[in-house]
Image (tube, rainbow, N blue to C red):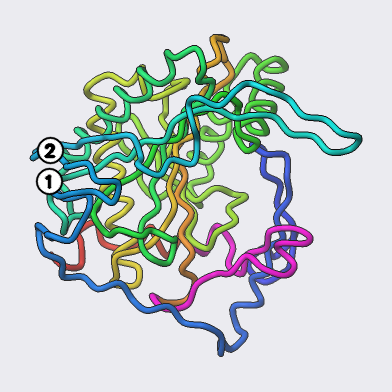
Amino acid sequence: MIDFNNSSHRRYNILTGEWILVSPHRTKRPWQGKEEEPAREARPSYDPTCYLCPGNERAGGSINPEYTRPWSFTNDFAALQANVPIEDFEDGLLRAESETGTCKVVCFSPDHSLTLPVMEVEAIDDVIQLWQKEFKELGARQDINYVQIFENKGATMGCSNPHPHGQIWAQHSIPQEVSKKGKNMLAHWEKNKSSLLGDYLAQELEAKERILIQSDHFVALVPYWAVWPYEVMILPRKKHKNILSLNAAERADYAKVIKLMTIKYDNLFKVSFPYSAGIHQAPTDGKEHEEWHFHMSFYPPLLRSATVKKFMVGYEMFATPQRDITAEMAADTLRNLPNVHYLG
């Protein structure tokens, strides 16, 4: 039997079909590399220089409304364009095709000082309702086949504005990561007539090693194949293809688990914890996609402290993702953190 917490080994990701190298013995090595500047905690509830605060002028010249609940708008500097001619290009081994879509910004709150872990559950529920509204409207468009909801939190993750917000990119093609997951979910569905993630969740609930939070409708856990040091997945117990089918009770429960999970993150190193989080759900290409089981993943970069991050370089770039602590180690650490935010 492999001593997973002390021996190098590989783990298989059932969603992507890829492997990750796990090297738990490397946690003993000294660190003399780059250290991050911890995020400053105190921020005003309103910042006159913030382009996301209510009533302020954005970089593109538009004026924000005096919004009082979660609010979304089309990104002034969107990565995807709606009016691109549909064309394919091929010249020998060189290929390209046009890509169309839209990008939206979702302000979680009018309060500049808030983040998800310090927002009320009801306020996070409001955010989820806005996600549902945007997913429904964007997904109904003929030119949109996938809707990606995500949040980059903290300067460490490249977030240029600390105002609580996320983004939605909706596009004509289906992104590679989603295609890989969809392929493996479909293969499992056709073979077993059951959800890949539903079956995986049942096994995790029995093992209990990587479970962090359990509620009536959702479970938060560290995936067996996690890449990032404190990576977490939030899964609905029931197989929902996307967030639209969540009822009011499930939606409120989802909001509660998001709050509890992000509180644990902040409590880990007593800092506003940086991460990239995203929801993977069924494409909106008109197909049934009965195989899909939506899930939300958190990819935080911090490894040893609030100032030391995990870099995906060298071997990770040229070979295979690698991590220095096992999923079980990470789960044990996160599970035992308080459910009350360290700032009170």
In front of the other: 148 or 331:
148
Main SS of the magenta segment?
Answer: loop
In the image, residue 149 lies in the stretch drawn in magenta: no
Q: Residue at x 59, y 62 (%)?
A: 326
Task: Write down the residue under mark 1.
Answer: 54
In what quadrant of the picture does the N terminus appear? bottom right
Residue farthest to the right, as pictured: 92
- The amino acid sitting under disc 2 is Pro
Disc 1 crowd rating (10 Å Cα; few below 14, some 14-19, many 20+) is many
Task: Write down the residue under mark 2.
Answer: 65
Task: Give the quarter of the image for residue 174.
Answer: top right
Q: Is residue 223 visible?
A: yes
Q: Is residue 187 left or right of residue 92?
A: left
Q: Is residue 47 left or right of residue 184?
A: left
In what quadrant of the picture does the C terminus appear? bottom left
Give the vertical position of 223 relative to 158 (above or below): above
Q: Residue at x 52, y 22 (%)?
A: 282
Q: Which x, y percent locates residue 89?
A: 77, 29
Q: Is residue 293 visible?
A: no
Give the vertical position of 127 relative to 301 (above or below): above
Disc 2 crowd rating (10 Å Cα; few below 14, some 14-19, many 20+) is few
- The amino acid sitting under disc 1 is Pro
- Magenta extent: 306-330
